[in-house]
């Protein structure tokens, strides 16, 4: 089976399913704005033959958030790592968002955005996150730049995902590892949990210090 996919290696502490409940937004000339801002996000889909955890780039994919009075549907069009180290991960996303009235289901507005998120571990089940975001109108007109901070809480422990949307992720990762010359990392099996590797474990070999 010939397959093509894009993956990037993540540290063990980022792997899992994370939930955000609130965020604080900072805009120039305005006081900080805390608000209800619910989102669930998954990091990590497969494990290589040395215990390293890999995140599948699924673009385009959907993310749903909830803020007071609206449900927000993001279509993530680009997801790429900017920096990956043992203690910090920075990811850039480009998206289109539909803000929908929670009561009547009408579209309130549509925006585009370019966002850079940085994650750091606070403990095994909590992430500290901050973001820099530039928003644009439907026609591409700049609408503003702001920063945001929030805390993510782990709601599900990482485990390898064997299949997603009818695709065999074991085959996809193996093909990617072959194409990038990482033959010694090709997994032999899947479906088993991964123990937390030490900083010097082989699974961290592709992550910067």
Image (cartoon, helix red, strand yellow):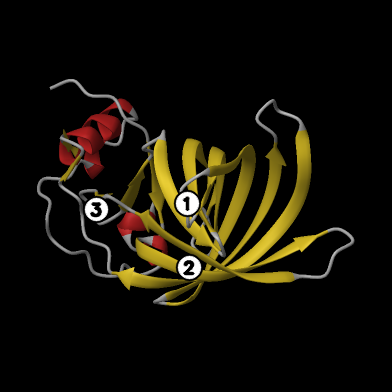
Task: Answer yes or no: is residue 206 visible.
Answer: no
Q: Residue furthest front?
A: 104
Task: Answer yes or no: is residue 141 visible.
Answer: yes
Can you say whether 72 is above or below 124 in the image? Answer: above
**Mark 2 packing: few (<14 Cα in 10 Å), some, or many (20+)?**
many
Q: Which mark is residue 20?
A: 2
How many numbered markers are drawn?
3
Q: Which numbered mark, 2 or 1, is in the foreground of this view?
A: 1
**In contact (CB < 8 Å): disc 1 and disc 3:** no
Q: Report the residue marked by disc 1.
A: 104
Quarter of the figure with residue 204: bottom left
Quarter of the figure with residue 123: bottom left
Quarter of the figure with residue 150: bottom right
Q: Which mark is residue 50?
A: 3
Disc 1, SS: loop
Work out whether mark 2 precedes mark 1 in sequence or the reverse, and give the earlier one: 2
Spot occupied by residue 21 in the image (x, y as percentages of width and height): 49, 71
């Amino acid at each position: 089976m010939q397959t093509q996919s894009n993956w990037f290696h993540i540290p063990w502490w980022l792997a899992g399913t994370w939930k955000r409940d609130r965020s604080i937004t900072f805009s120039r000339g305005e006081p900080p704005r805390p608000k209800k801002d619910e989102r669930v996000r998954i990091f990590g889909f497969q494990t290589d033959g040395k215990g390293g955890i890999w995140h599948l780039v699924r673009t385009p994919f959907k993310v749903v958030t909830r803020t007071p009075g609206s449900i927000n549907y993001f279509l993530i069009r680009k997801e790429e790592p900017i920096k990956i180290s043992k203690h910090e991960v920075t990811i850039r996303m480009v998206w289109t968002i539909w803000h929908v009235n929670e009561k009547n289901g009408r579209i309130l507005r549509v925006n585009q955005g370019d966002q850079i998120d940085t994650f750091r571990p606070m403990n095994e089940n909590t992430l500290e996150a901050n973001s820099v975001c530039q928003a644009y109108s439907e026609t591409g007109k700049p609408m503003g730049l702001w920063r945001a901070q929030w805390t993510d809480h782990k709601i599900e422990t990482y485990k390898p995902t064997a299949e997603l949307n009818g695709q065999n992720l074991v085959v996809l990762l193996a093909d990617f590892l072959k194409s990038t010359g990482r033959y010694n990392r090709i997994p032999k099996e899947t479906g088993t949990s991964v123990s937390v590797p030490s900083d010097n474990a082989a699974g961290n070999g592709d992550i910067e210090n």
